[in-house]
Amino acid sequence: MDNIEITTVADDLVVIHDGANVRRYTDLTPDTEHDLDGVRVRTLARPAGSLLCRFATVNDVHFGEVEAGRLDEHSTGPVQRVPEGAEPYPEVMNRTAASEINALGVAALIVKGDLSVDGRPQEWAAFEACYRDPFGDRLHVVRGNHDSYQHQDSYAGDQWIQLPGVNVALLDTAIPGETTGQVTATQIEWLADRCSSSPLPVIAMGHHQQWVGEASGRRSDTYFGLHPDGSDLLDGVASRCPQLIAYTAGHTHRHRVRTMTASGVPTIEIGCTKDFPGTWAEYRVYEGGVMQVVHRMSSPEALAWSEQCRTLYAADGVDYAAYALGALGDRCFNIPLR
């Protein structure tokens, strides 16, 4: 039982992974403790009202990457690669994600940045071939830091995505040439105007995670995610606009949920698609709330690669499996309306 991981819990679904073995339990009763072949799991409560739509997100898909686990030329790893002549792992992982998401019949797929390693045309072409064909105009994309290191402007700009029961504000948080991110005063004004006039709940999304008064207490624009000043402005919009129910990002390659300092609104991070644990996020929009359900990809080839990546950065003292997967409550939960 030591290797068993409860990877996904919804109102009607539980998925358990034991290495390459996957156990799926469907048609479960919501908000109930279930004994699933010796594993006790409580399903999520179902938000009130009808299910209005489902949409999904991926981030940190990294087309063009050939090594996982290398931070710089001095990385001691372990650094993982596929054998010479084998299919690149970003293609394997993203093809699985696209297939699993498309099978849900989602209203939209939102890609929250880092489509590529360095924003090269062939990397974006591989991304488009994987995701544009199955999703067409349901695909909504914003750049990340890896897509703008050479000051590219493809996939730039904020977007307002209208879906049944919810609006999504997709923010371009990239600073061309930089790893860190920002939201500007102009973006905040746009977001506040959109939120204040929205008849529906709003989820804001971007590539970089929010600064929320980190444990060190240090405010610095060298923070790995959104600069603190912009992060506070985002919190201010949430304080003024009850329509804004969450902000969700990628960038950190981990699953984590915190709360904004002033508004108490959840600020969420979703793990990467391209290595361990190899995930994507589903959002079930009900009249009375939104459910986040993170799925670990379960095709044999995706699982084989993600399992190979469990020990990335171990030589640097990082427990990558624990860091990236996070707690179950960081992956699967309900986002209430305000």
Image (cartoon, rainbow, N blue to C red):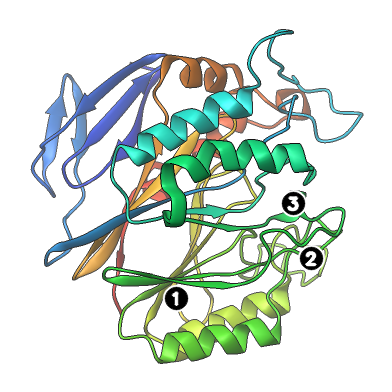
Q: Is 125 above or below relative to 306? A: below
Residue on which the image places disc 3: 147
Identified by mark 1, the residue type is Gly
Residue 50 falls left or right of residue 160:
left
- Crowding at dot 3, Cα within 10 Å, few <14 / some 14-19 / many 20+, comes out as many
Between tags 1 and 3, which lies in front? 3
What residue is pinned by disc 2?
Answer: 175
Q: Residue at x 39, y 17 (%)?
A: 2
Which residue is located at x 13 percent, y 40 percent? Answer: 33
Q: In which quadrant of the rendered view does residue 1 lie?
A: top left
> What amino acid type is highlighted by mark number 2?
Ile
Alpha carbon separation for disc pair 2 and 1: 27 Å
Q: Residue at x 50, y 30 (%)?
A: 95
Q: Indicate left or right for 308 with 67 as reference.
A: left
Secondary structure of residue under mark 1: loop
Residue at the image position 61 percent from the left and 40 percent from the top? 127
